[in-house]
Amino acid sequence: MEYEEKTGRAQRPLSPKQNVRKNLDFEPLSTTALILEDRPANLPAKPAEEAQKHRQQYEEMVVQAKKRELKEAQKRKKQLEERCKLEDSIGNAVLTWNNEILPNWETMCCSRKVRELWWQGIPPSVRGKVWSLAIGNELNITHELYDICLARAKEKWRSLSTGGAEVECEDAGFSAADREASLELIKLDISRTFPSLCIFQQGGPYHDTLHSILGAYTCYRPDVGYVQGMSFIAAVLILNLDTADAFIAFSNLLNKPCQMAFFRVDHGLMLTYFAAFEVFFEENLPKLFAHFKKNNLTPDIYLIDWIFTLYSKSLPLDLACRVWDVFCRDGEEFLFRTALGILKLFEDILTKMDFIHIAQFLTKLPEDLPSEEIFTSIAAIQMQSRNKKWAQVKRILKKKDVSSECGSH
Amino acid sequence: SGEFLVIGSAGTGKSCLLHHFIESKFKQDSNHTIGVEFGSKVVNVGGKTVKLQIWDTAGQERFRSVTRSYYRGAAGALLVYDITSRADVPGDERADGRERGGGVPEVRPHHPQQDRVRYRRNGNWELGSGIGNWDWELGTGNWVWELELGTGNWNWDPGREGLDPWESGILGNLGIVAFLKCTPNVLHGIESGTGIGNWDWGLGIWDWDWGLN
């Protein structure tokens, strides 16, 4: 209110000027600087013919400038309208999510209408709720369990910093040194998680939250512990959920087969995922696939980063969240579909690159990725190969892998 | 072109070093590397042009099985480690008492200004124990160079004795020196088509768990 009053006062002295121009449809900018002047009085006046010519030229210039300004004004108006439209549609989407979908989650979440709306991207204000519901809580983690895990983590930190006795922790096969190293590493990595946002770093508002969730997880799952990449996932969840809910979503998310395979660095399983990815790669982008093969560019080179961080490190954050949206809807296969979408979008330039340039490009994607184009490109990727879906292809490859292992023994 | 690895524990500054080597600029905010990232640079060694393909690997021990699979094609490697972390220095004993494989046969700290360089660790300024580089003469007659470079995200105190290690080029040059010194090795590997010989002994140098596997 105060601000409006102030600006209102500030505008008042300008009003006489505005009156002069009120017959104009738009506010001219540069034309106001174009003023035709006669020669200074100490010089001989222009001949009439020349003066006439100059006047004509001047008028043409003014007309051109006005035209340009009008065009720009129209462009701005259009942009503003588009923004308003976008804001309206987000506003409408929020209403639909809040009033229709969320209260009837079980019955509505799989309907075609909801799936389509979901693909458009979940509005940030309901994103956390939708992610939580979609990820679920198979592990039945309660807020109390989070508090217990956090308390144990804090105890461990205390005993580490005071150099006191080792806190007993029932874990499987990791030495005390590894665990200590992993607690140290959490500290180190927090400051290296979205450093440009300046909110997870020492002294930032979410530093302790991120530290708590990662620490609590190492106590909840000492068999998995802290693995690099986790801090990005936890950070994205923190940005959308309250701490305990973020922990619940985090633990359940990491418990999914794909995430478990990667975070445990289970080489055999990871190779199965890469092999399944290559089946769909060849199916969708045969030319690029052949080019990658020729250059010895294996999928691990770019997929490890993308899968471990669920794209949150490699894509701009808003785009990454949209990938998460559909990942929550479609599951792991969407992560691989996204990868193919990215490859498809850049197919032409990638086909012209050699190994090192492809590797550099894919491990450091351009910063100004157009999100609509990416999603159009992802939509064009068929996750079906010879009538087989992702899960089937993966199952067949896994079986093959197991049987070849048995054969070699 | 030659494939070249940058390896070492988490937070030792591998990516920062690589960034400085390629861009000749210090990187302020850096994410940690997941999996592997890449850089490339054309260098001139002994009148020959070599295009280095640099593989910058993730530092966490858990990823060792992934990074190890990249050793095979490499012609050389740069091991970066944290001079302030006992557990990180090759040849030192592990925190749990097991001895690491490999080790440093001979240490020759050589930089005259070593004790003037300070580094920041967990927000505190500390005095470095020195910048040194070690060289190994291996059974094959090849050389592998390693470089120790303080800690993770390099935040150097520019005010200290009017010396900014980056401005003065001490660190920058050292980084580049480390790579260039490696390059004849890379070149040799490329020419003979063998990489730096047999990676079995290679593992002995930087994979501290090799004796245990």
Image: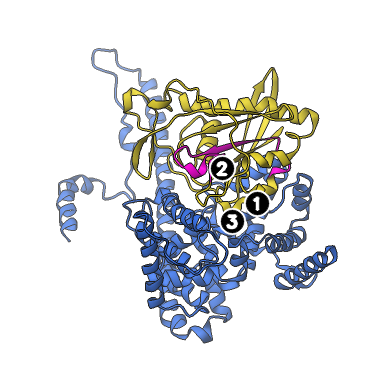
Measured in 3D between alpha carbons, the distance from the residue under mark 1 to the one under mark 3, in whole angstroms, is 31 Å
Quadrant of the frame with the C terminus of chain A: bottom right
Residue A326: where, in percent of width, then height? 56, 68
- Give B199 or A168, whichever is nearer the viewer: A168
| A1 part of magenta stretch | no
Question: Is disc 3 in the same subunit as disc 2?
Answer: no
Chain assignment, label 2: B
The kind of residue on which mark 1 rests is Leu
Question: Is disc 2 in the same subunit as disc 1?
Answer: yes
Which colour is chain B painted? yellow
The kind of residue on which mark 2 rests is Gly
Q: Is residue A119 visible?
A: no
Question: What span is colored magenta in the figure?
Answer: B71-93
Q: Which residue is mark 3?
A: A306
Which colour is chain A painted? blue
Number of residue marks: 3
Q: Secondary structure at mark 2?
A: loop
Q: Are marks 1 and 3 in contact (CB under 8 Å)?
A: no
The residue under the point 72% across, 51% down is A298
The kind of residue on which mark 3 rests is Trp
Answer above or below: position of B158 versus B153: above
Q: Which residue is mark 1?
A: B212
Question: Is disc 1 in the same subunit as disc 3?
Answer: no
Answer above or below: position of A192 versus A273: above
Q: Which residue is mark 2?
A: B8
